[in-house]
C-alpha cells in the first residue's frame, strides 16, 4: 500500500505535556511520559461537558475544538484503540455487583460518543466517523481520512486518542503498552508532503508509545524517513 497526504496543523495532549513548545522539547529529547503527571485543564471545552467525559475523550474533544476554531473543517474522524473502555469497565463492575448503572456511563459508552460530543460542543453538524483497528488504529485512520478525501471532503480533522486503561486489565496487556490518556489531532488534506508505504515485517513487541505519538515525535523532528511498527507491517514514512 502507498499513499500521501499533507498535514496542515496539529495539536496533542498527554500527562504533563500539552503546549506546542512542550511537545517540541519532548521530540528533541524524548523521554517516558509520566502517567502521574497532571493533565492540562480544558480551555475550549465547556465545563459541564468536560465533567461528563472520560479522560481520553476529554483530551480528544479539547484538541478537536481547538483545531476547529483555527480551521474550516469539512469532516471529522476520531480513532481510538480502546474507546470507552474506562467507562465500560465501570458498567461491567456495576453489573457484576448488582449495582445500578450510571445513566451517563450508559449513554456515553459507545465508541462514537466522543466525536458526537465534539460536534455538539462545536455546534457544527459535520460529517463524522469513528474507527478502531487494534494496534494499527492510527494508521488505518489515515487510510480512512484518504477515503473521505476521495469522497470529496477536502480538509479532514482526525483525532487519535485513548483514555486510562483500568488497572484490572494491566496484567493481561503487553508490559510496554501505554495505559495513560493522550490525544493527537491532525488537520489533513490531499497532497504529497508526507508519503507512506507499507512493508511486510515480522511481528514486533508492543512499542512504548501509541502510533500517533510515534508519528508526532518524528514529524516534529522533521525526520526525512522513519518507520511506525504495526501488527503485521511497518508503515514507512518519507518526505520527498
Image: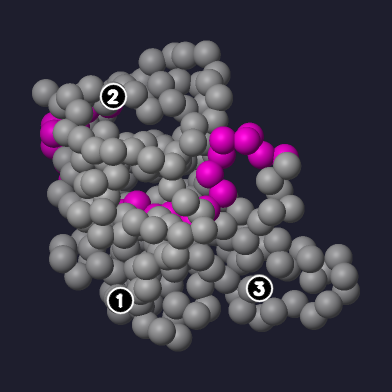
Q: Earlier in the sequence, mark 3 or mark 2?
A: 3
Q: CA distance from mark 2 to mark 1?
A: 33 Å
Q: Secondary structure at mark 1?
A: loop
Task: Evaluate whether residue 87 shows in this view.
Answer: yes
Q: Are marks 2 and 1 in contact (CB under 8 Å)?
A: no
Return the x and y of residue 94 as percentages of the image width and height.
Answer: 79, 71
Q: Which residues are magenta?
A: 172-196
Check residue 106 in the rendering and tell me which mark sits there, or answer none.
3
**Residue name at image x 72 percent, y 40 percent:** 172
**Residue name at image x 55 percent, y 25 percent:** 205
Seen from the viewer's position, the closer of residues 42 and 67 is: 42
Q: Secondary structure at mark 2?
A: strand
Disc 2 target residue: 226
Sort mark 2 into few (<14), some (14-19) or many (20+) by Cα contacts within 10 Å: some
Disc 1 target residue: 43
Sort mark 3 into few (<14), some (14-19) or many (20+) by Cα contacts within 10 Å: few
- Asked if the stretch drawn in magenta spans residue 112, the answer is no
Seen from the viewer's position, the closer of residues 223 and 194 is: 223
Return the x and y of residue 235 as percentages of the image width and height.
Answer: 36, 25
Return the x and y of residue 3 as percentages of the image width and height.
Answer: 26, 28
Task: Evaluate whether residue 153 shows in this view.
Answer: no
Return the x and y of residue 192 as percentages of the image width and height.
Answer: 13, 32
Q: Earlier in the sequence, mark 2 or mark 1?
A: 1
Q: Are marks 3 and 2 in contact (CB under 8 Å)?
A: no
Q: Which label lies toward us, 1 or 3?
A: 1
Q: Are marks 1 and 3 in contact (CB under 8 Å)?
A: no
Q: CA distance from mark 1 to mark 3?
A: 26 Å
Amino acid at each position: 500500500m502507498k499513499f500521501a497526504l499533507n498535514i496542515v496543523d496539529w495539536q496533542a495532549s498527554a500527562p504533563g505535556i500539552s503546549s506546542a513548545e512542550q511537545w517540541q522539547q519532548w521530540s528533541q529529547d524524548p523521554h517516558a511520559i509520566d502517567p502521574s503527571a497532571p493533565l492540562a485543564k480544558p480551555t475550549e471545552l465547556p465545563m459541564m461537558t468536560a465533567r461528563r467525559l472520560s479522560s481520553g475523550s476529554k483530551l480528544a474533544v479539547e484538541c478537536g475544538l481547538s483545531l476547529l476554531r483555527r480551521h474550516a473543517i469539512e469532516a471529522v474522524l476520531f480513532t481510538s484503540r480502546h474507546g470507552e473502555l474506562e467507562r465500560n469497565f465501570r458498567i461491567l463492575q456495576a453489573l457484576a455487583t448488582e449495582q445500578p448503572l450510571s445513566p451517563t456511563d450508559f449513554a456515553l459508552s459507545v465508541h462514537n460518543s466522543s466525536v458526537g460530543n465534539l460536534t455538539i460542543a462545536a455546534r457544527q453538524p459535520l460529517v463524522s466517523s469513528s474507527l478502531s483497528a487494534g494496534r494499527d488504529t492510527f494508521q488505518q485512520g489515515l487510510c480512512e481520512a484518504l477515503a473521505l478525501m476521495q469522497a470529496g471532503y477536502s480538509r479532514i480533522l482526525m483525532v487519535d486518542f485513548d483514555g486510562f486503561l483500568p488497572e484490572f486489565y494491566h496484567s493481561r496487556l503487553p508490559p510496554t503498552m501505554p495505559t495513560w490518556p493522550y490525544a493527537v489531532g491532525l488537520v489533513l488534506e490531499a497532497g504529497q508532503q508526507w508519503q507512506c508505504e507499507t512493508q511486510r515485517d515480522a511481528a514486533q513487541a508492543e512499542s512504548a508509545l501509541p502510533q500517533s505519538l510515534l508519528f508526532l515525535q518524528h514529524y516534529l523532528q522533521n525526520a526525512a524517513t522513519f518507520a511506525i511498527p504495526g501488527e503485521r507491517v511497518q508503515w514507512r514514512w518519507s518526505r520527498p
